[in-house]
Image (spheres, helix red, strand yellow):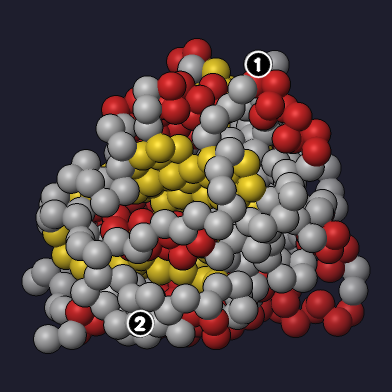
């Protein structure tokens, strides 16, 4: 039986199809641990780095050189340099922006100033820089520990080392909500394969300021064997990759060669497959509003009676305000307004209390979806056109009822202040809607002493510039 035809474990979201044409197959035998918010995520990642026996390989999009890891561990460079001092092979792929994408966020673009910083530190990890086409970026955020070893561990998610770490239960002004997932087992080998493919063909590797600490002609070998089974979760590592970035179609273990030079859109395809298969509930957290193709699929789900909650930044992105003023963008907002006409659709933000006792929106940077308490995806991919059709992205799709349900309960406990373990997924979405609407009404009336963080938003006006 071909790897792409391997069935999922009985009773774990079998009605939700998987992508049969991506680089990586759906694999069983994984242990999956979601990590909610930056303090728990980076704390666990740092622990894994400190326990690494052979290697630490990471892909970075946005980074602040003064970002502090939890518990006094120092900057990300401090963490990496200490690993090198222990004899661990440390490699980093940094994204180098093009002029069209230079304003997206803080980057370590490999300028002469950046090289001077590494030299002044005496940093001995290896680094390569990688461009994406046009206005797109390499948006994958992954950490891979002990690649190819029995202790191989992967982290896939969306958290950038840029903002102060957030401890659970302390959501406040200027903080971000985000998620990583830790994976051990056969699917971690696919994260290994992705790193090798990118490292070997990083676009800047042969330029004077395109590599640090090593011979730019060096090539890493692709993995030949899968990591041993570590758990019960079925996982598929999925990517979006722009055409022309990479050319080597070397197959991942147990899979067929993939024509990567033509690009890959397995994350985009999986979103649509999962939404179209939903029968009870869809819970989304995303930094961006869904593009029309996704919005149409969500509306079809609503027509089937599926309950949908969409958590987005409560304070709209600046570009949405500009789009609201452009007639040619009206169809984009029409799709959101259409969703809002369904009673069982909820658009929501989250808002924490400040030290002064007021409420301020917490920025939602997470990119996840849960379907029917059976399936989940966690990663770097936003629902805007750049992520779905241009950026390099990585998500982990997980077919496991226990993982999906536990993550739903954890997130709703944080956002609602309510334990929903005794509720099924539809009733939990109904509770989310009720509490979010009640909180919005209280906030509008000047009452900030409400339960949880969730606060419903108006789909018909979201994106308009306004002061609360």
Q: Which residue lies at the image location 65% right of the left edge and 16% below the top edge?
A: 355
Q: Is residue 13 visible?
A: no
Mark 1, other Cα within 10 Å: few <14 / some 14–19 / many ≥20: few
Camera-side residue: 364 or 415?
A: 364
In this rendering, the label closer to the viewer, 2 or 1: 2
Q: Answer above or below: position of 13 versus 353.
A: below
Q: Answer above or below: position of 313 versus 249.
A: above
Residue denoted by label 1: 355
Using the numbered discs, state the Cα–Cα distance from disc 2 to disc 1 in whole angstroms: 55 Å
Return the mark for residue 257. Answer: 2
Q: Which residue lies at the image location 55% right of the left edge and 57% below the top edge?
A: 217
Q: Is residue 71 visible?
A: yes
Return the mark for residue 120. Answer: none
Q: Which residue lies at the image location 25% right of the left edge and 70% below the top edge?
A: 253
Image location (x, y in percent) of residue 337: 67, 73
Mark 2, other Cα within 10 Å: few <14 / some 14–19 / many ≥20: some
Instruction: Indicate the quadrant containing the N terminus: top left, top right, bottom left or bottom right.
Output: bottom left
Instruction: Indicate the quadrant containing the C terminus: top left, top right, bottom left or bottom right.
Output: top right
Image location (x, y in percent) of residue 175: 62, 32
Q: Answer above or below: position of 242 versus 130.
A: below
Camera-side residue: 152 or 404?
A: 152
Image location (x, y in percent) of residue 26: 25, 72
Q: Is residue 351 left or right of residue 8?
A: right
Dividing the picture into quadrants, the one containing residue 90 is top left
């Amino acid at each position: 039986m071909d790897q792409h035809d391997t069935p999922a474990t009985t009773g774990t979201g079998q009605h939700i199809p998987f992508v049969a044409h991506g680089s990586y197959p759906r694999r069983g035998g994984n242990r999956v641990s979601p990590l909610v918010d930056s303090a728990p995520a980076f704390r666990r990642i740092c622990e894994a780095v400190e326990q690494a026996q052979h290697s630490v390989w990471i892909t970075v999009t946005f980074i602040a050189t003064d970002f502090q890891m939890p518990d006094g561990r120092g900057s990300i460079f401090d963490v990496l340099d200490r690993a090198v001092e222990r004899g661990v092979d440390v490699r980093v792929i940094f994204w180098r922006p093009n002029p069209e994408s230079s304003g997206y966020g803080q980057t370590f673009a490999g300028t002469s100033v950046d090289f001077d910083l590494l030299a002044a530190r005496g940093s001995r990890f290896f680094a390569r820089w990688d461009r994406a086409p046009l206005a797109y970026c390499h948006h994958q955020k992954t950490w891979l520990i002990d690649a190819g070893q029995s202790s191989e561990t992967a982290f896939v998610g969306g958290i950038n080392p840029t903002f102060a770490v957030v401890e659970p239960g302390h959501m406040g002004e200027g903080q971000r909500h985000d998620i990583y997932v830790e994976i051990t087992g056969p699917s971690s080998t696919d994260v290994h394969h992705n790193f090798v493919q990118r490292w070997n063909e990083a676009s800047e590797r042969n330029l004077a300021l395109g590599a640090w600490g090593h011979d730019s002609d060096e090539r890493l070998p692709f993995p030949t064997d899968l990591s041993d089974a570590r758990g019960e979760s079925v996982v598929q590592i999925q990517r979006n990759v722009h055409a022309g970035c990479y050319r080597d179609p070397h197959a991942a273990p147990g899979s067929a060669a993939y024509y990567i030079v033509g690009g890959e859109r397995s994350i985009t395809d999986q979103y649509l497959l999962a939404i179209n298969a939903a029968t009870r509930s869809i819970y989304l957290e995303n930094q961006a509003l869904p593009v029309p193709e996704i919005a149409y699929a969500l509306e079809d789900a609503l027509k089937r009676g599926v309950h949908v909650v969409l958590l987005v930044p409560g304070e709209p992105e600046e570009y949405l305000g500009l789009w609201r003023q452009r007639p040619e963008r009206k169809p984009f907002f029409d799709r959101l307004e259409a969703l809002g006409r369904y009673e069982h659709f909820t658009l929501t933000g989250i808002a924490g209390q400040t030290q002064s006792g007021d409420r301020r929106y917490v920025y939602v940077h997470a990119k996840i979806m849960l379907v029917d308490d059976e399936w989940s995806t966690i990663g770097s991919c936003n629902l805007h056109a750049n992520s779905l059709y241009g950026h390099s992205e990585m998500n982990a799709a997980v077919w496991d009822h226990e993982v999906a349900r536990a993550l739903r309960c954890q997130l709703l406990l944080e956002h609602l202040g309510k334990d929903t373990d005794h509720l099924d997924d539809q009733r939990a979405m109904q509770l989310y809607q009720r509490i979010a609407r009640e909180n919005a009404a209280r906030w509008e009336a000047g009452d900030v002493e409400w339960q949880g963080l969730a606060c419903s938003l108006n789909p018909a006006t979201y994106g308009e510039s306004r002061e609360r």
